[in-house]
Image: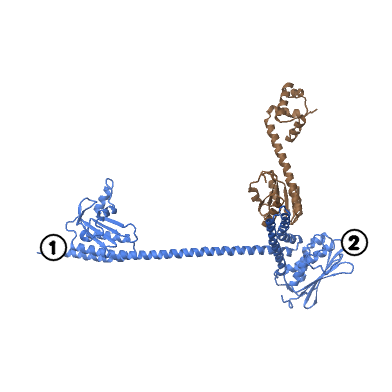
Chain colours: A brown, B blue
């Protein structure tokens, strides 16, 4: 298995459940790492790979829901909750907070594995988005302050002439900036540049045509 | 030889002093008893220096333990003064240096010693008298020195040899005492060591006992939780407690079973992994069985507190507890509680539990009733001198399955665990009573239980 192969984290205080899940998950060819508590999971070194967190609701110390809250600020893998009793309020809270699935014990392996695969797919997409955004930010950081001023006008569809008038410079200068922006952002077309700006959350200049 | 009268007087004085000194010497061992060799030598040297007005007196003790010999030296007070003054220019003579001087003759017979040596403190020649300590000088030696020309006189020799003998005896005693002390210390050490070992073993045992106690307490706690859940009979709580105890091993069994199947179906099959999973299934299955066994034992074991109870009081307390529930569901409560009911012997909480469950069941049974007033009827009476009877009647749809209704996990309620009546049954059984149900004609159900009165009770 290469380092990019997905990994499933299991956090459950019951060693019997950990052993069983570890065996079940590795039986379908997934990497698995088990932890006895939230603290153990938090302290562990995690591989840089698409992942899923199978989390027991009733953990001693930090509970599953508390761990979910703590993790929500970070780029953590999606969570599949498992629980000894089907406590409806808890399951509602878990799902509302973004959990993929809430499975009361004992659960069917197909349900669990379906949830795990869904979580891993979701994480893979989130990771791709994160890396794409990181790449766009890197390119955006190459722009000069003046080019960053010009960018909102370009993506708003302003003509060079009008932008030049608004920013107090010549049409030709704006044309040069525009060329630099397209080159640095590696945009093949204006449409692509617009999409990039959207992803970066750059507001278009007001008064667009 | 002519003897002058003055000489005689002088001689008598000298002899008197000698006798006095001898008496002092004989008194020394009493002072020494229990003392260290160094103390003994100390007092001996001081005494000799004073008695014989010596310029120096030196002692070397051989240590039979093979350690370095103990050396000690005393100089006449005036010379010691000088020695201290000299320290600035020259080094003070140390016992070892004097010892160096005497070493050549150490162990030799008295006749081999030179009669005179140079006093390292003053640089003057002095006459010396060496004496062995112990029968063969095995303890050490003592050397007295004086620059007087007539040293040693006969009386001085006498005093020195008596002093050497006394010192030998004292040192021998000290040595024996030291050995005894050593043995005693060794014994103490061994006793202390053994005591420490025993203490450690004890501490370990205590830890083990504490561990076992903790384990027992944990078990008791878990049982207490379960029995509290039973007693409180909030079905949800009891269900949660059971779920917690059983679902963990059950979840593991299911997941292991599925893992086992997947390992067997793999290409090539993971036989070893499948075997491991199957082994865990057996282990966890047994554990789940153990949990069930413990829960069942709980129903039987629930200890009964035996006190005299007025069942009317029990009913009153429960009605009070349920007042909110009956008001909310608009249930009219009617009571017919017999006067002068004989007391029963039993557990207040458990019997409250039974009444609570029966009343709650009755109230819930009337939930579907909309076309007529909800009426809950409770009666207590004493149909015979030996028995007290309690009846709870509702006007709900009645009981479809009166034979199965007391079975554990049998329920007609959507959210019920089917534990309530089973628990009531086990409590009434434990009180040597009877619990039964009857469905009324058309509508309503009646649950009744009877308990033996105090005189007949033999719990």
Residue toward you, B412 or A154: A154
Which residue position is annotated with label 2? Answer: B371
| B56 over B348 or under it: above or below | above
* Residue A110 seen anywhere in this rendered image of the structure: yes
Observer-nearest of A206 and B345? A206
The disc numbered 1 marks a residue on which chain? B
Q: Between A123 and B291, which is closer to the camera in this rendering?
A: A123
The chain under label 2 reads B
Above or below A97: residue B410: below
Residue A19 is situated, as x and y percent measured from the top left of the image, at 68, 55
Residue highlighted by disc 1: B7
The residues bearing labels 2 and 1 have C-alpha atoms spaced at a distance of 151 Å
Mark 2 lies on a secondary structure that is loop
Percent across and percent down for residue B202 are 53, 65
Question: Which one is earlier in the sequence, the residue at label 2 or at label 1?
Answer: 1
Residue B336 in the image, given as x and y percentages of width and height:
82, 70
Residue B335 appears in the rendering: no
Total number of numbered discs in the rendering: 2
């Amino acid at each position: 298995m290469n380092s990019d192969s997905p990994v499933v984290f299991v956090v459950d205080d019951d060693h019997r459940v950990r052993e069983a899940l570890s065996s079940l998950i590795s039986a379908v060819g997934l990497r698995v790492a088990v932890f006895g508590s939230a603290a153990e999971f938090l302290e562990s070194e995690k591989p840089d790979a698409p992942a899923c967190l199978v989390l027991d609701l009733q953990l001693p110390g930090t509970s599953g829901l508390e761990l979910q809250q703590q993790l929500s600020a970070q780029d953590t893998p999606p969570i599949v909750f498992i629980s000894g009793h089907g406590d409806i309020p808890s399951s509602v809270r878990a799902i509302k907070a973004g959990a993929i699935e809430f499975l009361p014990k004992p659960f069917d392996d197909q349900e669990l594995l379906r949830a795990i695969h869904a979580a891993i797919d979701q994480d893979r997409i989130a990771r791709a988005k994160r890396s794409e955004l990181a790449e766009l930010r890197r390119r955006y950081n190459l722009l000069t302050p003046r080019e960053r001023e010009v960018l909102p006008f370009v993506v708003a569809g302003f003509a060079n002439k009008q932008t030049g008038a608004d920013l107090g410079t010549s049409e030709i200068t704006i044309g040069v900036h525009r060329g630099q922006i397209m080159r640095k952002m590696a945009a093949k077309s204006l449409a692509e540049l617009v999409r990039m700006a959207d992803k970066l959350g750059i507001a278009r200049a007001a008064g667009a045509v | 030889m002519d003897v002058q009268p003055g000489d005689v007087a002088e001689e008598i004085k000298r002899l008197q002093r000698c006798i006095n000194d001898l008496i002092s010497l004989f008194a020394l061992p009493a002072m020494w008893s229990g003392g260290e060799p160094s103390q003994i030598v100390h007092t001996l040297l001081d005494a000799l220096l004073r008695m014989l007005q010596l310029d120096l007196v030196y002692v070397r003790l051989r240590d039979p333990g093979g350690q370095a010999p103990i050396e000690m030296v005393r100089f006449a007070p005036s010379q010691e003064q000088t020695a201290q003054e000299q320290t600035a220019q020259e080094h003070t003579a140390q016992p070892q240096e004097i010892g160096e001087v005497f070493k050549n003759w150490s162990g030799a017979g008295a006749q081999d010693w030179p009669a005179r040596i140079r006093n390292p403190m003053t640089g003057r020649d002095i006459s010396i008298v060496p004496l062995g300590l112990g029968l063969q000088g095995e303890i050490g030696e003592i050397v007295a020195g004086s620059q007087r020309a007539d040293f040693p006189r006969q009386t001085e020799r006498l005093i020195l040899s008596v002093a050497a003998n006394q010192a030998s005896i004292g040192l021998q005693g000290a040595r024996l005492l030291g050995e005894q002390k050593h043995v005693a210390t060794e014994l103490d050490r061994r006793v202390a060591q053994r005591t420490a070992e025993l203490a450690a073993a004890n501490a370990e045992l205590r830890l083990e006992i504490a561990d076992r106690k903790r384990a027992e307490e944990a078990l008791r706690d878990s049982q207490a939780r379960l029995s509290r859940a039973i007693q409180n009979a909030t079905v949800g709580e009891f269900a949660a407690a059971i779920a917690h105890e059983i679902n963990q091993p059950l979840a593991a069994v299911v997941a292991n079973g599925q893992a086992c199947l997947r390992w067997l179906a793999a290409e090539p099959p993971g036989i070893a992994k499948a075997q491991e999973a199957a082994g865990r299934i057996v282990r966890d299955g047994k554990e789940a069985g153990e949990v069930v066994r413990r829960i069942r034992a709980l129903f039987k074991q629930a200890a009964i507190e035996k006190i005299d109870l007025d069942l009317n009081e029990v009913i009153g307390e429960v009605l009070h507890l349920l007042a909110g529930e009956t008001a909310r569901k608009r249930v009219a409560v009617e009571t017919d509680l017999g006067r002068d009911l004989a007391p029963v012997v039993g557990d207040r909480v458990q019997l409250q539990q039974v009444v609570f469950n029966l009343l709650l069941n009755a109230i819930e049974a009337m939930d579907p009733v909309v076309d007529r007033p909800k009426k809950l009827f409770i009666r207590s009476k004493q149909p015979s001198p030996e028995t007290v009877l309690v009846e709870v009647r509702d006007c709900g749809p009645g009981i479809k399955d009166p034979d199965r209704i007391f079975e554990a996990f049998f329920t007609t309620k959507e959210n019920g665990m089917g534990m309530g009546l089973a628990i009531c049954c086990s409590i009434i059984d434990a009180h040597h009573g009877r619990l039964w149900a009857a469905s009324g004609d058309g509508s309503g159900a009646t649950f009744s239980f009877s308990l033996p009165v105090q005189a007949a009770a033999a719990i």
